[in-house]
Structures are given as C-alpha cells and as structure tokens.
Image (tube, rainbow, N blue to C red):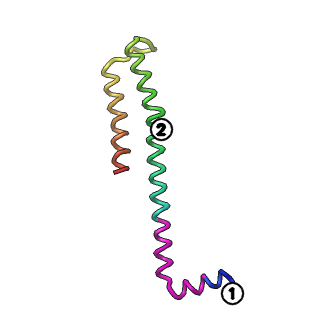
Amino acid sequence: MKLGKLIFETMQKAPGIYLVEIQNICHILVVHGEIRTTACQARLIIAERFHQFSGLISQCENKTGEKPVLEEDLDGFWDMIYFQVRFICNLLA
C-alpha cells in the first residue's frame, strides 16, 4: 500500500487527531516566530542603542560633537531606551 493512501485512510478514520496536530504545529511556529522577533529586537537595542548611548556619554563628558550633549539629553535618550527595553520584557513575560 502506498504511503499517501495509508495516510489518507488514517485521516478519514480519525480526522480530529490530525487536525489537533496541525493546530499544535501552527501554534508552535507562531510562538517560535514571536520569540525570534523579540530576540532580534533585543539584539538591535543592545547593538545600536546602547552603543549610541555610550557615544553620547563620551560626547557629554568630553564636550565634543557638533552640538553640546547635556545631561538632560542623556536622560531623555535613556528614557527612550528604557521604554524599548520594558516593551521587550513585556513580550517575554
């Protein structure tokens, strides 16, 4: 007996079992995608925003750059980063 025919006959005898399995697989794929998206967002914040923040701290301490970077600027930038970090933490919760 061919495998396709065997699977078809089995699905006819117990279609609910296969439907549940398909739903489980789809759910796993959705969750996997959400985890990957969240991990990528976290890596992006670490790679870009923290590096950018470090540069702003250096500019503020050394008084370098086109425009002076004030402590208030650092506070505002940190608030923006922290908002993104909290968002990612909520996705993982």
Disc number at residue 41?
none
> What main secondary structure does the magenta stretch of the protein show?
helix
Mark closer to the chain start, 1 or 2: 1
Q: CA distance from mark 1 to mark 2?
A: 53 Å
Left or right, residue 76 beside residue 31: left
Q: Residue at x 46, y 46 (%)?
A: 39
| Relative to 84, residue 6 above or below | below
Which of 1/68 is in front? Answer: 1
Q: Secondary structure at mark 1?
A: loop
Q: What percent of the width, then of the height, locates residue 91? A: 37, 50
Q: Residue furthest front?
A: 1
- Of badges 1 and 2, the one in the foreground is 1
Give the residue at mark 2: 44
Q: Secondary structure at mark 2?
A: helix
Instruction: Name which residue type carries label 2.
Output: Leu
| Relative to 24, residue 38 above or below | above
Q: Are marks 1 and 2 in contact (CB under 8 Å)?
A: no
Is residue 21 one of those drawn in magenta? yes
| Relative to 25, residue 77 above or below | above
Left or right, residue 18 beside residue 5: left
* Magenta extent: 7-26
Give the residue at mark 1: 1
Mark 2 nearby-residue class (10 Å; few <14, some 14–19, many ≥20)? few
Is residue 24 one of those drawn in magenta? yes
Q: Residue at x 60, y 82 (%)?
A: 7
Instruction: Name which residue type carries label 1.
Output: Met
Which of 66/42 is in front? Answer: 42
